[in-house]
Structure formats: structure tokens, C-alpha cells
Image: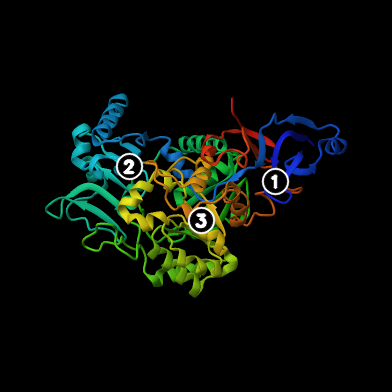
């Protein structure tokens, strides 16, 4: 059995005592902590690894993202850097010239954000037609909740003036109120775009491995697939059975449409098989705050018609989902951005939930401080998308006004109220940059330099807990992961500096130097 002793830098255990002078890895497990000399006596054949002043701590766990979706975006035209309609059109035109194909083959892009465009308007089908009229073009918004299709794509999807808006979605219309303008929102986007031709399984698996490596580069060894549909499951299972998964991957089945998978594949149900586990179920209650589809109790700023966003499900349906998850003994992850959606989940859990289920409110962007005591009472975990503060904080000021924007991702109040919290990146909405998220939760600074919610700032140690020990608790894996203790998995990350000893404003400068999964190095910075 291979033994390794790490020493010569800060070893941050995330337990008491907080530091250890050395750590020994025994196979894939943590064997012991203590003085280097004592560990060398116990493991005389161990490989010695000098940290050279760097910091070793538990590997990060991803509390919410979509590895299959991230994998799919790696094959798409990247649009996250475009900042105008003109630049968007130029990117599509350049891609079309570089990838000449027949008229029936699609061009798909991901990551545009209309909030960065002058006028904050989405493009239309006419914009896309002007640069690529003869091939179907579909571009997805950075949030993943909406997108735009050109005329050829609308025709291929069967969308015309007679196509009704689906429940929980909107098809954008032109001035006549009937002709589609190319914009697709929520269920209209997710439902229709599922019809786009897919790559081969071999191509999908290759992209999945690339996505896994992106997580490793960011110090993450436990990865989530945050809503797993039938096609996603087919990919994950194929990767697992082929031995392609080096990380632990936890998937949450689409409760509405993919629940039978848990019964069909019992070997994956709530336990790892070939590094893949079905952790529970997932539902959506509303949309995106930056896309103005999150469901609010009070109107959006400047909404003269009283627009508050909208729900996806009735209260009765949500109670049914919660009851089903409880009856099946499964954890439920629920997408809630607006405070009205948060209240719908809270009331459903109060009626039908079980605190021992560790159900999770995903994003909890605009959950109100007065709602947090009920979450604590119900055992609801708040998984905050704290990086919103940097990426879309200025948009939230415009969409919700100063008072509500100051209170987004209220981590300090959650801690003080006793709510278990975690932090996530919702990849592919943004890359799984845990270091940036820690910086965001501690500093709460927007792109424009606005301090959003000084009273909700937390310490670096508290931020680290949200991606280590608390994240392990969310996964029911606190006895295996999240801290450094003998008998736990040797899932480790080495940073170039100690996040508890650098200036808080410099936290985002930290770099992942090495990621270790069960004693094996899976990423090494060169």
C-alpha cells in the first residue's frame, strides 16, 4: 500500500485543532495527522512531500452544478465575452465561416448575457438571420434559462405563429402578438431545444472528461449533475461503466420526468457505483433574477404593470413533489431564486417534508431574512450562488432596487440563524471557480465596485466551510469528506497560499496547485 506524508506548509483540517504539522495518506485514505517525525516512524516507507510553504486542505465539494451541461457547452460557440449585439453577430458569422456545413446543420452558442449589451435587450431572430440565414442558429443565455433562435431554427423546431406558449414558458412575439421573434424563455427554451440533434456517445463522453478536468483544475473532487434527464443519465452511466469517472459524481434526477431511473438502477441509488451516485431529485420553482423570471412577492424595480416574475408549479404540485421525495426516501433539491418561490418551498416542506431529508434550496438568491428561521426549523439547507454578487450584482440593483439587492445571498444571517449553508457556481452558468466564490462571499463587491450587503459578509473560514464540511453534510458524506481526519478519504487540494492568512481582498488571487482524489493526483499546475 502506498503511503505519503505531507509537511512543510499549513495543513488546514477544517476541524479542531484547525492546523496539523503533517498529514499521512494511507492508500486512498487519511491515515494520521501529527508531527512529521511521529508519522515517519509509523510509515517508514512513505513518500515525503514538502509543501514548500503552500497550504493543504480538504478538496472542495461542488454543492450544485451541471457537469453534463458543462460538457455540452464545451462543444458550442463561446459567447460569454461578447458585449454588444454587433459583437455577437460577428462571432456567429466568424464561426459559420470557419465551420462551413450544409444548411441542415446547427450552429449553437452559449453564454451571451443581454445585461452587458447597450439597452439590455436580447437579440432577435432578425439579428441572427442577418449573419446566418441558411442554417439553424440557437444561442443560449448565460443563465441557461432563455435563448434566441433564428428563423431556420424556429422552423426546424416547429415554432410558428400558431404555437402556444408552454406552461411555465414564453415564446417572444413580434408587434402583431403572434409571429415569434426568436426569443425563448424558461420552458419554451428548455423544452424546444431538447429536440436539437445530439452528438455521438463517444463525443459526449470525451466532452464529459474535459468537463471533469475543469473541476479538478478548480480543486473539486465531488461533482454534481444538478438535474439529470434520461439523456444525461445515459451519458453518466456510460462514462461510469467505461471507467471514465475519476471524481465522485452525484446526480439529481428530474423528478417530473426521470424518477423511474432510481428504480431501474438500484445499484446507483444513494450510493456510489463506479463513482456515480443518484443523490435524489430536482425540481424548479422559478427562473432567473438577471433574466427577470425569478418569482418575487414584490414587483421588479420599475415594473409599472406590477410584474413579479412567475411560478412554474402550483402550490399543490409542489406539495406533491415534496411528498413524493419523502415517500421515496430521497433528498430534494429545489431551484428557488425569488422570495415567492422560496416561500412556496418553505410551505410545502412544512406541510409534507422531513427535516432529516436535508432538502436543499438551490440558489436562495432573494430569500428574505425573515424566511430563514423557518428554513432552520425545517432543516432546509441554503445553497447560495454567492458569485452572483460579482457577476450580476449591478443588474440586481437595477432589477430589485437597493434594499433587496443588498440582501441577496444572505449568508451572514443564515449562519446567525443556524441555517446550514453551502456555496456553488451552477456551472456552466459560470466556471466552477471555488476560489472566486469564496472571495465573493467574503467581500460582496460587484463588477462596478458596489458593496452589496456589508452586514452579510462572512469570514474566509466560514466561506471555506460552505465548500468543504457543510458541502459534505449536504451530500450525507460528512463522515467521508469535507475535513481532514483519520479514516476519511484522502481528497485534498493544495493552494499556493493560506486563504486564512491573506488579505480578504486578495482571496481571488489564490491558485490551485494540485488536486488529489483518494491519494492520487488528478491535477497538477505546471
Q: Tell me the residue at 33%/38% (across/down).
A: 108
Give neighbour class at mark 3: few <14, some 14-19, many 20+ (Cα, 10 Å).
many
The percent coordinates of residue 488 (x first, y second) are 72, 48
Distance of mark 2 from mark 1, alpha carbons?
A: 39 Å
The residue beneath circle 3 is 411
Distance of mark 1 from mark 3, alpha carbons?
A: 22 Å
For marks 2 and 3 on the same chain, the one whose residue lies earlier in the sequence: 2
Q: Nearer the viewer, residue 237 or 44?
A: 44
The percent coordinates of residue 269 (x first, y second) are 59, 57
Q: Nearer the viewer, mark 2 or mark 3?
A: 3
The answer to whether residue 520 is above or below residue 463 is above
The residue beneath circle 1 is 13
Image quadrant assignment for residue 8: top right
Q: Is residue 511 left or right of residue 448?
A: right
Q: Tell me the residue at 40%/69% (across/down).
A: 317
Toward the bottom, the furthest residue is 351
| Whether residue 419 is visible | no
Amino acid at each position: 500500500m502506498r503511503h505519503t506524508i505531507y509537511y512543510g506548509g499549513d495543513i488546514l483540517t477544517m476541524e479542531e485543532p484547525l492546523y496539523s504539522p503533517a498529514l499521512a495518506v494511507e492508500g486512498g485514505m487519511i491515515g494520521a495527522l501529527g508531527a512529521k517525525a511521529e508519522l515517519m516512524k509509523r510509515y517508514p516507507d512513505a513518500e515525503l512531500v514538502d509543501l514548500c510553504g503552500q497550504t493543504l486542505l480538504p478538496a472542495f465539494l461542488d454543492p450544485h452544478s451541471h457537469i453534463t451541461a458543462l460538457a455540452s457547452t464545451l462543444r458550442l460557440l463561446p459567447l460569454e465575452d461578447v458585449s454588444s449585439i454587433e459583437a455577437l453577430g460577428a462571432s456567429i458569422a466568424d464561426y459559420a465561416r470557419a465551420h462551413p456545413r450544409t444548411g441542415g446543420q446547427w450552429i449553437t452558442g452559449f453564454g451571451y448575457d443581454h445585461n452587458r449589451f447597450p439597452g439590455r435587450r436580447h437579440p432577435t431572430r432578425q439579428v441572427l438571420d442577418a449573419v446566418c440565414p441558411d442554417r439553424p442558429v440557437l444561442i443560449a443565455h448565460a443563465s441557461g434559462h432563455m435563448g434566441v433562435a433564428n428563423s431556420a431554427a424556429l422552423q426546424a423546431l416547429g415554432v410558428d405563429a400558431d404555437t402556444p406558449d408552454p406552461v411555465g414558458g414564453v415564446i417572444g412575439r413580434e408587434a402583431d402578438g403572434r409571429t415569434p421573434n426568436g426569443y425563448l424563455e424558461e420552458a419554451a427554451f428548455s423544452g424546444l431545444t431538447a429536440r436539437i440533434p445530439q452528438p455521438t456517445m463517444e463525443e459526449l463522453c470525451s466532452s464529459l472528461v474535459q468537463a471533469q478536468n475543469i473541476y479538478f483544475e478548480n480543486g473539486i473532487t465531488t461533482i454534481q449533475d444538478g438535474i439529470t434527464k434520461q439523456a444525461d443519465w445515459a451519458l453518466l452511466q456510460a462514462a461510469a461503466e467505461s471507467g471514465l469517472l475519476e471524481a465522485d459524481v452525484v446526480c439529481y434526477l428530474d423528478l417530473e420526468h426521470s424518477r423511474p431511473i432510481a428504480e431501474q438502477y438500484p445499484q446507483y441509488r444513494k450510493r456510489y457505483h463506479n463513482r456515480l451516485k443518484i443523490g435524489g431529485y430536482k425540481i424548479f420553482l422559478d427562473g432567473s433574477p438577471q433574466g427577470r423570471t425569478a418569482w418575487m412577492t414584490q414587483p421588479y424595480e420599475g415594473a409599472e404593470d406590477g410584474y413579479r416574475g412567475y411560478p412554474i408549479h402550483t402550490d399543490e404540485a409542489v406539495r406533491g413533489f415534496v411528498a413524493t421525495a419523502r415517500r421515496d426516501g430521497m433528498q430534494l433539491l429545489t431551484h428557488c431564486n425569488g422570495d415567492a418561490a422560496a416561500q412556496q418551498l418553505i410551505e410545502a416542506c412544512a406541510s409534507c417534508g422531513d427535516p432529516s431529508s436535508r432538502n436543499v434550496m438551490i440558489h436562495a438568491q432573494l430569500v428574505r431574512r425573515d424566511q430563514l428561521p423557518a428554513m432552520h426549523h425545517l432543516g432546509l439547507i441554503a445553497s447560495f450562488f454567492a458569485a452572483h454578487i460579482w457577476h450580476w450584482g449591478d443588474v440586481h440593483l437595477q432589477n430589485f432596487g437597493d434594499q433587496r439587492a443588498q440582501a441577496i445571498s444572505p449568508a451572514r444571517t443564515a449562519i446567525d440563524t443556524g441555517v446550514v449553508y453551502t456555496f456553488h457556481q451552477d456551472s456552466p452558468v459560470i466556471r466552477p471557480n471555488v476560489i472566486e466564490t469564496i472571495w465573493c462571499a467574503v467581500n460582496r463587491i460587484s463588477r462596478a465596485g458596489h458593496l452589496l450587503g456589508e452586514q452579510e459578509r462572512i469570514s474566509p473560514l466560514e466561506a471555506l466551510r460552505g465548500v468543504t464540511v457543510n458541502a459534505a453534510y449536504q451530500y450525507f458524506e460528512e463522515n467521508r469528506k469535507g475535513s481532514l481526519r483519520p479514516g476519511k478519504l484522502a481528497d485534498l487540494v493544495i493552494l499556493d497560499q493560506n486563504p486564512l492568512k491573506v488579505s480578504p481582498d486578495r482571496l481571488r488571487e489564490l491558485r490551485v496547485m494540485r488536486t488529489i482524489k483518494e491519494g492520487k493526483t488528478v491535477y497538477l499546475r505546471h
